[in-house]
Image: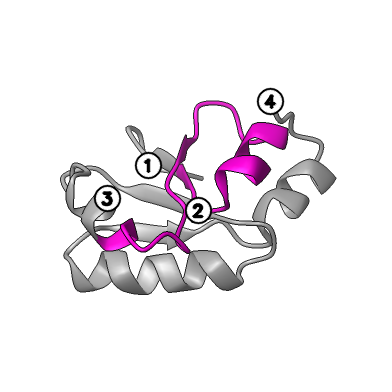
Amino acid sequence: MAKEGTVILDVRTPEEFAAGHIPGAINLDVQSPTFADDVASLDNAVPYAVYCRSGNRSQVALDIMTERGFEAFHLAGGIGAWQSAGYDIVS
């Protein structure tokens, strides 16, 4: 269960995000050359639940975020696991 105030961060491409994402998620593409700068603009006083499609890209994002002092954790299984658990996505 996520901590209160947790921000959901989708690190997939903008196209993947537009096709469907977890309600309330924000999108920062981990494959973008500006990802590290984009992360620096986030509030590091709140926790982040990070996800992608399967977990590979979100692990890269987690590594970058934790190096910069963020409290971030992995949404295991990505958006596929979210949907398999019966939760909605929005586009």
Q: Residue at x 42, y 47 (%)?
A: 28
Q: Residue at x 22, y 56 (%)?
A: 37
In the rendered structure, which segment of residues is drawn in magenta? 9-36
| Residue at image mark 1 | 3
Looking at the image, tell me whether mark 3 or mark 1 is earlier in sequence order: 1
Residue 7 falls in image quadrant:
top left
What is the three-letter code of the residue carrying label 1?
A: Lys
| Residue at image mark 2 | 11
Looking at the image, tell me whether mark 4 or mark 2 is earlier in sequence order: 2
| Residue at image mark 3 | 38
Residue 34: say if magenta.
yes
**Residue in the foreground of this view, choosing between 17 and 67:** 17
Q: Residue at x 36, y 63 (%)?
A: 33
What is the three-letter code of the residue carrying label 4?
A: Ser
Looking at the image, tell me whether mark 2 or mark 3 is earlier in sequence order: 2
Q: Secondary structure at mark 1?
A: loop
Query: Mark 2 and mark 1: span between their CA atoms?
Result: 20 Å
Query: Mark 2 and mark 3: span between their CA atoms?
Result: 11 Å
What is the three-letter code of the residue carrying label 3?
A: Asp
